[in-house]
Image (cartoon, grey):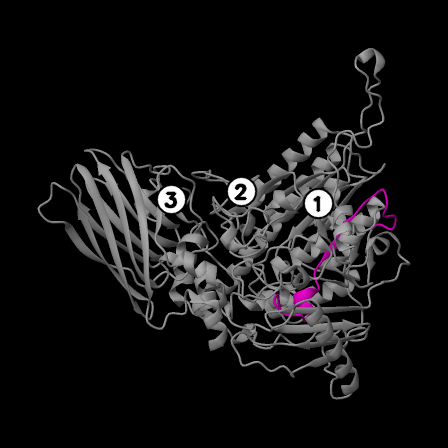
Amino acid sequence: MANRRDKDLLKSGDPGEGWQGKIGKTFADSTPWWRPPLQAPKGAPNIVVILLDDLGFAECGCYGSEIQTPNIDALAAGGVRLNNYTTVPMCAPARAGLLTGKNPHSVGVGWLTHNDPGYPGYQAGEISRDAPTFPEILRDAGYSTYAVGKWHNTADFNVSAGADRSGWPLQRGFDRYYGFMGAETNYFAPGQIVEGNELSTIEGYDDDYYSTDDFATKAISWIKAHRSSCPDKPFLMYFATNAPHTPHHAKPEDMAKYKGVYDAGWDALRESRYAHQKEMGIIGADWELPRRTPGVPAWDDMPKDRLDIMAAYMEIYAGLVDNTDKNIGRIVDTLRELDILDNTLIIVTSDNGASSIGGDDGAANFAEKRVLNNEDSALARSMLEQGKLGSVNSSPAYPKGWGNAGNTPFRFFKRTPMNGGIRVPFVAHWPERIKDAGAVRSEWVHVTDFMPAVLEILGQDYPEQFAGYRTRTLDGVSMLDILLDPKAKTKRQVQYYELEGNRGYIAGKWKIASLQPPGAKLDLDNWVLFDIENDPTEVNNLISEYPEIARELIEKYDADAFANYAYPIDNRTLIKAMTHDPYEMKRINRDHVFYQNCETHQALMVSPLVADRDFVMTCSFCHAEGQEGVLFALGDSLRGFCAFVKDGQVVVHYNGGFLVKRDLRLPVQEGPQMLTIRHTAKGKLQGAAEITLDAPRLDAPQSGTLNMSPTILKLNGEGLDVGLDRRTKVSAECEGRGSFKYAGRIDFVRIAPGPQAPGSFVNLAEELAQRDW
């Protein structure tokens, strides 16, 4: 019987099956018949989903912010705002929930794309194949489907030239894609651009390039092209910006608008936003403003000689949000100019709440601070005084005090199931169907409720099978009636939350939560209980008064968590992003050879080969007099090392960060050459390389030693280029010369990885790391 069912689930591709004409020997005794083209339901709306990244509840004007967001505000004025919308408190899982209508653990996306710990709920961020995405549903219903911006639902190890592309956007429902695959990127010079199914070989960016501008321009061009080619066909535009995620980059003219606005500090800002929220009615008059989130310092306690830096971080962030709104306005203006705005459903929301990743003081280079938990205090001062903080050659994150203000009136941050992590803005605009423009809805809606709404718009049920897979039931319930009907009540009763060991459960008016600090000993019994109907800002822990309610919710949490594969708990620090499953361990411990005239080899694929470990890197090339250019470049202007030929010398440059730049120069002769970098990792982030340049004409190799401390831990930006240095330059000496292509022949660049440094936490085998934990 099971085999029979499997057969019934298969589609027929037989061109004669269902054909309704007549076939004779000639046209004269035959009757043609044409299958009707796939068409969406009559009147089906265009759908534009604008998914922002790490935007807190209070960071749009229509949610109480002083940041200028007139375009989002206009959508709210012409549509509805939700003040009780919950999401999942981190990007990849939230996207999986939005795209599939299922709890993210249940489709394998319980965490990020960096590692696979070997459990069903945590499969390196890739959505299981039995869970169709709403773009796949829409495409099969007659829509054209476009995606621009951040994807972040493909495993890091599957983003390379020869990798499995089954989790890439085009294989998960989109006709066209333009953007980047990972968690974050440089706004002024993205380390990776993917178009369609191809990794772009773009060599550099114009001086005025900015990724949010670029993404909006691409979205607009595709919408216009769609209207020209298929004016009667509806479309989906999934516009998922990296804004305002770190690194907080802003154009000078955008951040300049906010100069001096934040000098009073984050405590005053939080009070101001709270008052504004109450005035505009986005929160209830009886909502209490809690004390600062535990661990957030008072503004008045911050060192007085660093307050200008603290304020500058927020000026940058405000400029970033301001620019994002302007680009949303460009898209909306396009819809209006094309006369399709009225029947376009536009959603603007965020994947999770504002972040605390910058720590107490903020970070000028958060990519390293989040791993090392410290940063030279002189770095931010130096960057600010040079006008580089927030620029292409910085990687800033604002202090968590600003994130706390961003989540006003809630406490806590992204990564937690507290309301600061899961309650975010949600604006819906659809003039043809939403008739009470400007309204605020307070009914509970969750991120998984969008996919069922799409099905309701189409008049379809969730399919029992899709693309050859049996599906499981949806976890979401349609939000459509709540968006359209001011009298509609939520159909949602319960929801579990889990991220990095932080757990939560809502059942009606009751909510429990348990927070597990990263790296701390687990305390599975540290639950708190809130009555979120009467205490939406989670001020009063009622667990001692209602222990029986807490016990009941804990039992329900455990049942749902096990059913959805949320267990086992993993509250390790971000060091777990540098562990590897057994198959990846084989890859990162073998030699790799790279060649000239190839696309950039992705950073997350290459950096484990050299991260805090011994390695031997060899470059075989041929040199003729006058030839110059880059032999190889690993990394970008923020971190990495490279070798290039200039002025008759081979220069090996180590970029250890904003304050660490070192060179070794060796004379180069004509003819075949072998450059060898033999690196020894000594422990405690100390490393040095013996470098030799050998050629047949030399009696003995040229040689020298280069200090390569602090050692590379993980490169998040640009990867490895052979024969040129695309995008930002590892060495400032290579700037102003385009990609500085080497004019001669490069045979290969080989990396032979060796042992890890003594005591290193990088490149641990996942299985062993779990045992040690």
Q: Residue 60 carries which label?
A: none
Q: Residue 194 carries which label?
A: 2
Question: In the figure, 758 relative to 177: above or below?
Answer: below
Mark 1–mark 2 distance (CA, rounded to whole Å)? 20 Å
Q: What stretch is highlighted in magenta?
A: 413-437
Q: In this view, does 545 lie to the left or right of 513?
A: right
Which residue extends farthest bottom? Answer: 544
Residue at 61% across / 58% down in the picture? 91
Q: Magenta residues: mostly which secondary structure? A: loop
Mark 3–mark 2 distance (CA, rounded to whole Å)? 16 Å
**Quarter of the image where the N terminus is located:** bottom right
Mark 3–mark 1 distance (CA, rounded to whole Å)? 35 Å
Q: Would you say residue 522 sits in the magenta stretch?
A: no
Q: Would you say residue 426 sits in the magenta stretch?
A: yes
Residue 539 percent coordinates (x, y): 72, 78
- Residue labelled with disc 1: 136
Q: In this view, does 685 lie to the left or right of 56?
A: left
Residue at 47% across / 47% down in the picture? 191
Residue 88 percent coordinates (x, y): 67, 63
Going from the N terminus, do you reach mark 3 or mark 2 first? 2
Q: Residue 721 carries which label?
A: 3
Mark 2 surroundings within 10 Å by alpha-carbon count, few (fewer than 14), some (14 through 19), many (20 or more)? some
Q: Is residue 258 left or right of residue 601?
A: right
Going from the N terminus, do you reach mark 1 or mark 2 first? 1
Q: What element carries label 3?
A: strand
Going from the N terminus, do you reach mark 3 or mark 1 first? 1
Q: Is mark 1 on a helix, strand or loop?
A: helix
Can residue 383 be seen in this snapshot? no
Quarter where residue 550 is shown: bottom right
Q: Report the amino acid beneath label 2.
A: Val
